[in-house]
Image (spheres, helix red, strand yellow):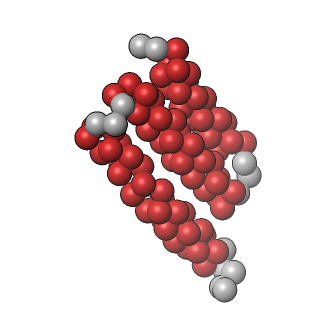
Amino acid sequence: MSVAVALCLALAVLCAWTAALAFWRLPTPLERLHAVTFATIAGGAAVMLAAGLTDGLTPRTLKCAAIWLVTVPVGALLSHVTGHALHIRDGERR
């Protein structure tokens, strides 16, 4: 494994730990959604970059990119819907 790949994977682990710490420290559920979104986007990008550095431009790398590109908007949609549900639960109709 090259140094660049190891750094990308270490960055992905660092993103996961940072998001877990933020999830633990943030006071409201609405703020905790940001930690989950950060882990999804930043950690996924680091893993995708590591796959690209390992294999180059291959079908496996393109599949990783496609999965990440689908995960980003779906994760944003789920965060939005969850935030809306939290507002409704707290009685803040918008």
The residue sitting at 59% across, 68% down in the picture is 83
> Is 68 located above or below residue 49 in the figure?
below
Outermost residue toward the front in this view: 57
Side (left or right) of 43 relative to 60 = right
The image shows residue 25 at horizontal and vertical percentages of 72, 42
- All told, the count of numbered labels is 0
> Which of 77/72 is in front?
72
The residue sitting at 48% across, 42% down in the picture is 44
**Where's the C terminus, which quadrant?**
bottom right
The residue sitting at 28% across, 36% down in the picture is 58
Outermost residue toward the left in this view: 59
The image shows residue 34 at horizontal and vertical percentages of 64, 54
**Where's the N terminus, which quadrant?**
top left
The image shows residue 15 at horizontal and vertical percentages of 60, 35
Place residue 87 in its image quadrant: bottom right
> Which of 18/62 is in front?
62
**Observer able to see residue 88:** yes
Outermost residue toward the bottom in this view: 94
**Observer able to see residue 89:** no
> Which of 87/42 is in front?
42
The residue sitting at 32% across, 44% down in the picture is 62
> Is 68 located above or below residue 78 in the figure?
above
Side (left or right) of 21 relative to 49 = right
